[in-house]
Image: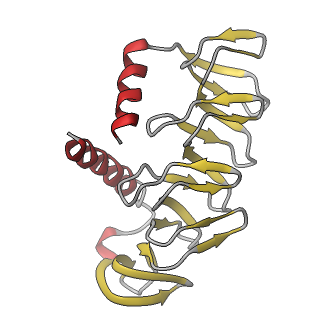
């Protein structure tokens, strides 16, 4: 069962990343296999990599830690780059604290965290329930947390009943916020959905 779930998740991650490589002309890409650690565009790579025809790095598995302003991406993580060569997506090799948040990671098939082109965190999945901008966000492989470019919380699943913008909102509801913290949208909690995802979190 675990293998089936991992394969399904891998397909979702691959499809998601593939759909976001549109900035590159697919007819001008190439796939290479590196038998030894090689430095390309400032990154240490090993194994399968994807580049443009002229050798500009698109995606790779990291062969060394990558030091960010607020966090270190561990060796063995799977990386997709923005056209400006800043990191766009990362499937973390292991749980890692990025910009103050402990993010999910268990290898190339783990859900990808996402960065804006300027390096600020855009999307992540939490290892533990975490307070962000005064809101307790739920953890898990299926509970994404979304940020604006200036670091404001835009969306998360609530870890407990909370009063937000004058409204009492039930735990496990999915909220979407404006940058000023006002409620934009609420998707009410669903017991069946939450139970299934909790079970999958335990299995994974």
Give me the residue at 73% from left, 67% from top: 69
Where residue 116 appears, as percent x and y from the top left, is 62, 56
Q: Residue at x 70, y 9 (%)?
A: 168
Q: Position of residue 135 (x, y in %)?
A: 72, 28
Q: Quadrant of the C terminus?
A: top left
Check the image and tell me how it is coloured. Answer: secondary structure
Point out the image quarter for the N terminus: top left
Q: Determine the residue located farthest toward the front in the rendered image.
A: 202
Rendered residue at 41%/72% (across/down): 61
- Viewer-nearest residue: 186 or 2: 2
* On screen, residue 90 above or below 86: above
Picture coordinates of residue 107, whole percent (x, y): 39, 59
**Left or right position of 61 against 103:** left
Residue occupying the point 49% across, 60% down:
90
Q: Report which quarter residue 91 is drawn in.
A: bottom left
Q: Is residue 152 left or right of residue 22?
A: right
Q: Can you say whether 169 is above or below 55 in the image? A: above
Relative side of 66 to 78, left or right: right
Quarter of the image where one finds residue 27: bottom left
The reply, left or right, for residue 154 in relation to residue 111 is right
In the rendered image, residue 12, in percent from the top left (x then y), is placed at: 31, 46
Q: How many marks?
A: 0
Name the quadrant containing residue 161: top right
**Nearer the observer, 133 or 56:** 133
């Amino acid at each position: 069962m675990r293998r089936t779930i991992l394969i399904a998740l891998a397909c979702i991650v691959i499809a998601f990343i593939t759909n976001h490589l549109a900035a590159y002309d697919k007819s001008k890409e190439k796939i290479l296999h590196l038998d030894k650690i090689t430095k390309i565009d400032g990154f240490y790579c090993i194994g399968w990599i994807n580049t443009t025809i002229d050798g500009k790095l698109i995606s790779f598995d990291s062969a060394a830690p990558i030091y960010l302003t607020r966090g270190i991406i561990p060796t063995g993580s799977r990386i997709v780059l923005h056209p400006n060569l800043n990191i766009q997506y990362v499937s973390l090799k292991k749980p890692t604290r990025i910009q103050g948040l402990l993010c999910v990671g268990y290898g190339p098939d783990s859900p990808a965290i996402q960065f804006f082109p300027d390096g600020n965190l855009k999307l992540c999945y939490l290892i533990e329930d975490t307070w962000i901008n005064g809101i307790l966000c739920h953890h898990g492989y299926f509970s994404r947390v979304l940020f604006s470019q200036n670091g404001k919380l835009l969306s998360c699943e609530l870890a407990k009943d909370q009063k937000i913008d004058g409204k009492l909102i039930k735990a496990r509801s999915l909220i979407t916020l404006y940058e000023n913290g006002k409620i934009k949208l609420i998707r009410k909690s669903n017991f069946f959905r939450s139970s299934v995802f909790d079970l999958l979190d335990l299995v994974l």
